[in-house]
Image (cartoon, rainbow, N blue to C red):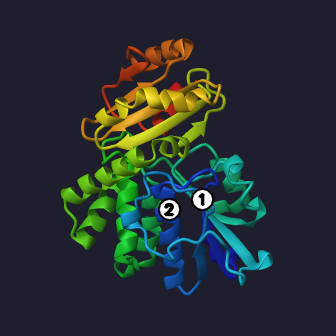
């Protein structure tokens, strides 16, 4: 970051709706990096964790839901990770106090460039975690990273690139994952275990798993207003619970869609019961709905679905 923007204390946070593994990992890793550089920094969020944040990866004190008293409003700078849409952060973060942004969701580059200049890091890449690791490498401190933090970044990249199979995966994502896995001496079995843990989280509280990863869609004529996402190792058991899931969404009185990502079989299952939206989605993705379910030829992240359906 540009040193002219340094302030005595930093609060690293993400969106206020929910916190996924990428956002959680980025908050923790950026706070640790700044602390190693002698800065006052804290990872903070009051947002609920979604199913991708596994308890086995969390450590006490990594992230707080209350800002320390010594972090005065006058002398604090906010670093925003894994989100850049002002509408998703304005209720929890004073926008005039934002000093840096790290996000892999494009669309608000000019907005932040005009406000914070070169401290805006928004680009098309698999995971925001990769952008944060880039900062570690710039500082030459990556070998001092805690193992627990490295595992969070690894999980974030795996989750956000669908085990490196999504079209948004870049070479930098792959290189970062390989470096971190080599550092922590992890093999592919660890990846399988992570996604299996995620699936256990989903199945343990299916309703919250869905509603803590549902995005309101704006300015999109193809998709329904609400698009939920579940990323699991094997979608079969989730699909068997569709009657229960449909009951959850019936309470909303709104059109919806669920993107169920199957890591094992490298595909997605789109679930949508609105006929008009089905027809539009079928044309874009060259798929067919049967009883409200359509299987895709490849796995899609929600952000890829949104991008593909925008004019």
Q: Earlier in the sequence, mark 1 or mark 2?
A: 1
In the rendering, at what x and y percent does residue 102 appear?
A: 56, 59
Q: Which residue is mark 2?
A: 24
Check whether the beta carbons of the residues at disc 1 and disc 2 lie within 8 A of each other: yes
Packing grade of label 2 (10 A; few <14, some 14-19, many >=20) is many
Q: Quadrant of residue 81?
A: bottom right
Residue 64, which numbered label?
none
Q: Quadrant of residue 218?
A: top right
Q: Is residue 131 left or right of residue 65?
A: left
Q: Is residue 225 left or right of residue 242?
A: right
Q: At 41% from the left edge and 46% from the top edge, which residue is drawn?
A: 202
Q: At 57% from the left edge and 52% from the top edge, which residue is drawn?
A: 18
Foreground of the two, 25 or 250: 250
Foreground of the two, 128 or 48: 48
In the rendering, at what x and y percent does residue 276 appear?
A: 56, 12
For the residues marked 1 and 2, what is the alpha-carbon distance in whole angstroms? 8 Å
Q: Which residue is mark 1?
A: 14
Q: Report the number of numbered marks.
A: 2
Packing grade of label 1 (10 A; few <14, some 14-19, many >=20) is many
Q: Is residue 111 visible?
A: yes
Secondary element at image label 2: helix
Foreground of the two, 265 or 29: 265
Query: Relative to 125, is 1 above or below?
Result: below
Q: At 39% from the left edge and 44% from the top edge, which residue is drawn?
A: 203
């Amino acid at each position: 970051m540009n040193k002219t923007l340094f302030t005595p204390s930093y609060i690293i946070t993400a969106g206020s709706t929910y916190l996924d593994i990428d956002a959680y990992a980025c908050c923790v890793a950026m706070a640790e990096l700044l602390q190693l550089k002698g800065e006052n920094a804290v990872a903070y969020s009051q947002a609920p964790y979604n199913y991708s944040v596994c308890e086995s990866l969390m450590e006490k004190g990594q992230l707080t839901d209350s800002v320390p008293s010594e972090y005065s409003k006058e002398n604090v700078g906010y670093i925003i990770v894994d989100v850049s849409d002002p509408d998703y952060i304005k209720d929890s973060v004073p926008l005039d106090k934002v000093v840096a942004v790290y996000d892999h969701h494009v669309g608000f580059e000019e907005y932040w460039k005009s406000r914070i200049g070169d401290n805006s890091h928004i680009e098309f890449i698999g995971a925001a975690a990769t952008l944060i690791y880039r900062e570690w490498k710039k500082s030459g401190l990556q070998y001092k990273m805690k193992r627990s933090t490295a595992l969070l970044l690894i999980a974030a990249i795996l989750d956000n690139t669908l085990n490196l199979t999504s079209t948004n995966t870049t070479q930098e994502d792959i290189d970062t994952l390989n470096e971190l896995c080599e550092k922590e001496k992890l093999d592919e079995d660890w990846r399988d275990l992570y996604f299996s843990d995620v699936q256990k989280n989903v199945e343990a509280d299916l309703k919250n798993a869905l509603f803590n990863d549902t995005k309101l869609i704006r300015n999109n004529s193809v998709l329904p207003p609400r698009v939920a996402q579940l990323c699991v190792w094997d979608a079969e058991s989730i699909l068997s619970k569709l009657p229960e899931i449909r009951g959850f969404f019936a309470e909303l009185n709104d059109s919806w869609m669920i993107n169920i990502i199957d890591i094992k079989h490298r595909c997605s299952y789109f679930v949508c019961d609105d006929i008009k939206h089905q027809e539009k989605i079928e044309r874009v993705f060259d798929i067919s709905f049967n009883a409200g379910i359509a299987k895709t030829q490849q796995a899609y992240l929600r952000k890829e679905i949104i991008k593909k359906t925008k004019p």
